[in-house]
Image (cartoon, grey):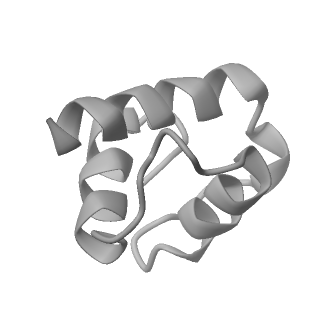
Amino acid sequence: MKWTDVQEIAIQLADRHPEVDPLRINFVDLMNWVVALPEFDDDPKHCGERILEAIQQAWIDEAD
């Protein structure tokens, strides 16, 4: 999984952290959780605020 796999990342985060409100997560934690996903295989340096915002929004959509 790469940073561009926003939807798949959001699904996995929702599954692994069902108790978390994605509206309240800070981007540092979000990035760390993405990098810690077992199937994630991308360079953490390729992450930016826009990618994290997209992941957060997809997670919010997934939670609805």
Q: Is residue 6 left or right of residue 15?
A: right
Q: Quadrant of residue 38?
A: bottom left
| Quadrant of the snapshot with the N terminus | bottom left
Residue 21: percent from the left, percent from the top? 41, 53
Residue 49: percent from the left, percent from the top? 75, 27
Name the residue nearer the viewer: 8 or 20: 20
Residue 43: percent from the left, percent from the top? 74, 54
Kindly identify the residue that appears in the image at 60 percent across and 51 percent down: 25
Kindly identify the residue that appears in the image at 41 percent across and 26 percent down: 57
Q: Is residue 34 left or right of residue 19?
A: right
Residue 34: percent from the left, percent from the top? 55, 61
Q: Is residue 1 left or right of residue 58?
A: right
Looking at the image, residue 18 lies above or below residue 58: below
Q: Quadrant of residue 58?
A: top left
Most extreme residue toward the left is 64
Kindly identify the residue that appears in the image at 14 percent across and 35 percent down: 64
Most extreme residue toward the right is 45
Looking at the image, residue 35 lies above or below residue 47: below
Most extreme residue toward the top is 50
Looking at the image, residue 49 lies above or below residue 11: above
Kindly identify the residue that appears in the image at 47 percent across and 35 percent down: 55
